[in-house]
Image (cartoon, rainbow, N blue to C red):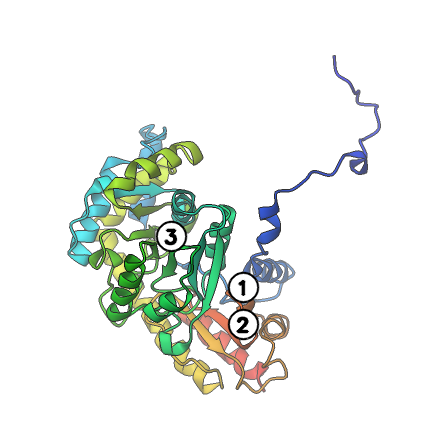
Amino acid sequence: MPTTSPTDPPIDPRSLRALQLAQRVHAIEPFRVMEMVKAAGDMKRSGTDVISMSVGEPDFGAPEIVAHAAMRAIQAGATQYTDSLGLRELREAISGHYAAVHGLDIDPGRIVVTAGASAGLLLACAALVDEGDEVLMPDPCYPCNRHFVASFGGTPVLVPASSDDRYQLGAAHVEAHWGPRTRGVLVASPSNPTGTSMTPQQLRAMLAAVRARGGFAIIDEIYQGLSYDHKPLSALALDPDAITVNSFSKYFSMTGWRLGWLVVPQALVPVFEKLAQNLFICAPTIAQQAALACFTPEALAIYEERRLAFQRRRDLLVPALRALGFTVPVMPDGAFYVYADIASVAHPHCGDSSAFAWSLLREAGVAIVPGDDFGVAAPQRHVRFSYATRLERIEEALARLERFLG
């Protein structure tokens, strides 16, 4: 019998016993960029024209050929669970992509398709990080990386990386900061928020330093398709035992489809498969079916056009920011970010990136991200610009920024 009726008074939530939250919740900080996005959205809904240079999401959607592949899959009823490692056809297509782009022979059996790169990073941390283990990563870096490690009881160790290091974790950093509890490293090349890649020499030396200590190397390569000044280099070309993470979100313009992949050593495939079975079952089936079309000549031609469009945006934005007083010591060679130092900018908030970013949003209608999301190494001096928006909007944002700076 029901214990209440429609006439019963509502239950006062204050009468419920407070739940005890897991300690890991308190260790995870808010993702501040999303607060900026929320505020910008509120302004747009109130009628203010806001130019978004905050979110790391391509303004290009999935090409029609990819969308049509998804619709065909739905119509054909190809919507049920796949193997936990992913569709065999998709893993083979990804393997072929490594051969075409990197000249690498990657066994499809080593490829694990995941629900976005985030799920791939979670699987890697679940497999490799124990309570109290330390994982080195550069500062600045993508904020969720440290939270992935902390979620499994590990301790992220942020190592300050300067522009001299291209804001990347080098062999010298590994040697200086490796301790008795250190298990490995987590790096990204190209990086969010800096857009900089590791040079081949940097990457080779860093991997060798980790390997010499018996550690693991997780390399986030989700922006490698968006490389501008050189051919992209996968860590797999230098160390077949590296664990690499990739995604269909950035280069392939499929952010909301939630699809990514890992390449792992053959011996670890059963471990990742077991974890995937229990934590995710499988990546979204429709997204996997659609992603098969990403590797067709038609789609790849579109992606190349888009890559060149991003490069043109970068080549406009960086010199313009420097002319306005921002310091950009390293030209970003990948992704779609510029990590700029505001200390020399003529503005009252040049020493407080958070106040600067919020003032720019409210007074000029331009949304950027303050540096405090990305680490503890001088975040108050840095802001991140995303150029994942069309060229004419970037030009308008620069005009507004010039007026904002007076």
Three-letter amino acid code at the position of disc 3 = Ser
Amino acid at pointer 1: Asp
Q: Position of residue 281 (x, y in %)?
A: 40, 32
Question: Which x, y percent locates residue 130?
Answer: 45, 45
Residue positioned 60% across, 57% down in the render:
38
Report which quarter residue 47 is drawn in: bottom right
Is residue 401 depicted above or below 300 in this figure?
A: below
> Which numbered disc covers residue 373?
1
First of labels 2, 1 by sequence position:
1
**What whole-number distance in Å separates the C-alpha atoms at marks 2 and 1?**
8 Å
According to the picture, the residue beneath numbered tag 2 turns out to be 379
The CA distance from mark 2 to mark 3 is 27 Å
Q: Which residue carries the number 3 mark?
A: 249
Q: Amino acid at mark 2?
A: Pro
Residue 228 higher or lower than 104, as above or below:
below
Q: Mark 2, residues whose alpha carbon is within 10 Å: few (<14), some, or many (≥20)?
A: many
Q: Residues within 10 Å of mark 3 (few under 14, many from 20)?
A: many
Judged from the image, the secondary structure of the residue bearing numbered disc 2 is: helix
Q: Which quadrant would residue 283 be assigned to in this image? A: top left
Q: Are marks 2 and 1 in contact (CB under 8 Å)?
A: yes
